[in-house]
Image (tube, rainbow, N blue to C red):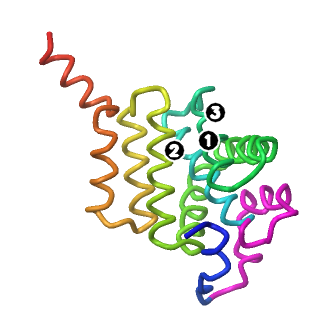
Amino acid sequence: MTFDRYVRSAPRPPGPPAETADTETVRRIVRELESLPPERARFLAAFAYILARAASADLHISDVESAVIERLVAEHGGLPEAHAVLVAEIAKAQSTLAGGTEDYVVTRQFRELSGPEERLRLLRCCYLVGAADDSISSEESSVLQQIARELDVERADVNVIRNEFAPKLSAIQAWFGRTAG
C-alpha cells in the first residue's frame, strides 16, 4: 500500500485533531509541503525527521547520510528532488536543534499516522541511513533500537532488519577484524 492510500484510509486515533498535536518540527516541514494533503505532509515530515534522528545518533550528519535521507524522502514521499532536499534540510536542522523529547514525540506521531508496513519501511530506511558510510556505530545501533521500540515494531521484525544490516554493524566488523588477523 502506498503512503497516499494508507494516509487516506488510516483511521484517526482518538484525541486532539492532528493539527493541534503537531510538534514545531512537523508544523515547519508541513508548511513547506503546502501543496500536499495535510495528512500526507505530516506523515512525510515525521518520516524525514526520524531519518535525520537516525543520522544524528553519533552527533554528526555526514554528507553521505544527507544524500541518503534526501533520496529516501524523494522515493518514499513521491517528491521532486528540490522538495525532498528542502524537507531533509529542515528535518536535519530540527533534529539537531530539538532532539530529546522531540525525538520521542515525532516518532510517536509517526506511529499514530502509520500502519505496521510503513513503520517497518521507516525502520529499514533508518538502517539504510545508519549504514550510509558502510558502518553502523554502537551509538547509531542504540538509537535504531530505540526508534524500533517507540514505533512498536515487533522484536522479531526488528531482528530481521537488523540481520540484513549485520555486516554493517561496527561491533560485527570489529569482531571479524580481530578474527581475520
Labelled pair 3, 1 in contact (Cβ < 8 Å): yes
- Could you tell me the amino acid type at mark 1? Ile
Q: Nearer the viewer, residue 155 or 23?
A: 155
Left or right, 147 with reference to 10: left
Horizontal and vertical percent position of residue 11:
59, 86
Say if the magenta span includes residue 5: no
Say if the magenta span includes residue 26: yes
Horizontal and vertical percent position of residue 91:
69, 47
Mark 1 or 2, which is nearer the eye?
1
> Which residue does the image show at 71% across and 66% down from the upper left?
42
Left or right, 97 with reference to 82: left
Marked residue nearer the N-terminal end (3 or 2): 2
Quick check: 59 above or below 118?
A: above
- Could you tell me the amino acid type at mark 3? Ala
Mark 2 packing: few (<14 Cα in 10 Å), some, or many (20+)?
many
Magenta highlight: main SS:
helix
| SS for callout 3 | helix
Mark 1 packing: few (<14 Cα in 10 Å), some, or many (20+)?
many
- Could you tell me the amino acid type at mark 2? Ala
Mark 3 packing: few (<14 Cα in 10 Å), some, or many (20+)?
some
* Residue segment shown in magenta: 15-40
Q: CA distance from mark 3 to mark 2?
A: 14 Å
Numbered circle sitting on residue 67: 3
Quadrant in which residue 7 is drawn: bottom right
Quadrant in which residue 131 is drawn: top left
Horizontal and vertical percent position of residue 79:
75, 52
| SS for callout 2 | helix
Left or right, 122 with reference to 89: left
Q: CA distance from mark 1 to mark 2?
A: 10 Å
Q: Which residue is mark 2?
A: 54
Quadrant in which residue 3 is drawn: bottom right
Q: Which residue is mark 1?
A: 69
